[in-house]
Image: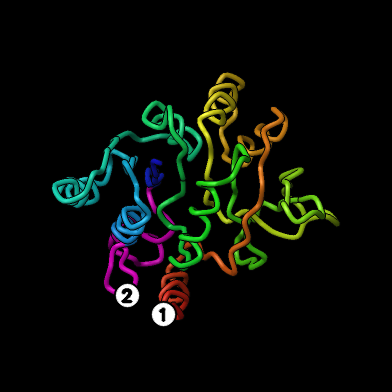
Amino acid sequence: MNFAIISAGEGSRLAQEGVAKPKPLVELNGEAMIERLVRIFMRQGAGRVVVIINDLVLETRAFLTRLKEELPIELVVKTTPSSMHSFYEISHLLEGDRFCLTTVDTIFHEEEFARYIEAFRTSEADGLMAVTDYVDDEKPLYISTTTTDDLRITGFHDQPTPDCRYISGGIYCLTPKALDTLRRCMEMGQSRMRNFQRQLVADGLCLEAWPFSKIVDVDHAGDIVKAEEFLSEE
C-alpha cells in the first residue's frame, strides 16, 4: 500500500499571520508536520510515500531531499493551481495498488489512523473516507451517509442536510479505480477535491465513512497551538 501527501500550496495565510517557516516545516511539539506524516506512514507499512511540493519554496525542497536519504520518499516538485491538480500530477505513481492520500496540514491521532488503515486493508469498498463530527473548518464538506452500520456515503455537500452526520476529514483511502474518476474530472475541467469526491459517488464507486473523534487542520497561526494541544492528548 502506498501513501501520498499533497503539500504544494504556498501557505500564504500562515505567512501573513507571522509564521516564518513554510507550512510543511511548521513544527508541532518539535517535529515538522511533513516529517511527522511520513514517519507515521512508515509505521503503517508504507511501500512508498509520494510527496508533491511546489517549486517556489526551496527550504521545503532541501528538507525533503535530506529526508529522502533516510526514508523511501518519492518527491515531485511542481507548482499546481489546486489540490486536485496536485493529486493528478502524482496519480501515475499510485497506479496498481491501494493508497492513502492526505494534505500536509491534516492532524490526527496516530492510534485512530492505524485503525483506519487496518480497516481499509480488509475493506471491500472502493474508498474509505476519514470523517469527523468535529467542525472547525471555514468551509467544511458535509457528508451524507446511509443509516446502516457500514456508513455508505451517499453524497458530499457544501451545506448540511438532515442526513449529514459528519464532515470530511481530508484523508482518503482509495483503490486505483478512483484514478479513472480523477482523470475524468480533469477532462471536465474540475479543480477542487470536493468535486472529485462528488464524482466518485456519481460514478457509482462504493465509498464508506470511517469516523475519527477529531481531525484538525492547520490553516492559521492559532491552529498551531490547537494542533499541539490535540496531539498532547495522545
Residue depicted at 59% across the width and 69% down the height: 213
User: In which quadrant is the C terminus drawn?
Assistant: bottom left
136 on left or right of 64:
right
Quadrant of res 205: top right
Question: Marks 1 and 2, Cα distance to the nearest angstrom?
Answer: 8 Å
Q: Are marks 1 and 2 in contact (CB under 8 Å)?
A: yes
Q: Is residue 23 visible?
A: no
Residue placed at 64% from the left, 36% from the top? 195
Q: Which residues are magenta?
A: 10-32
Q: Which mark is residue 29?
A: 2
Other-residue count near label 2 (Cα within 10 Å), few / some / many at <14 / 14–19 / ≥20? some
Residue 143 place in picture, x, y as percent = 71, 51
Residue 25 lies within the magenta run: yes
Instruction: Say whether residue 65 is left or right of residue 130.
Output: left
Which badge, 1 or 2, comes first in the chain's sequence? 2
Give the residue at x 59% y 21%.
184
Secondary element type, mark 1? helix
Residue drawn 51% across the image and 36% down it: 84
The quadrant of the rendering that contains the N terminus is top left
The amino acid sitting under disc 1 is Ser
Q: Amino acid at mark 2?
A: Asn
> Outermost residue, right direction?
162
Q: Classify 215 as above or below 197.
A: below
Estimate the x, y position of residue 32 in percent, counting from the top left.
29, 63
Label tally: 2
In the picture, the disc for residue 232 is 1
Q: Position of residue 123 (x, y in %)?
A: 58, 45
Magenta includes 26? yes
> Is residue 169 shown to the viewer in this render?
yes
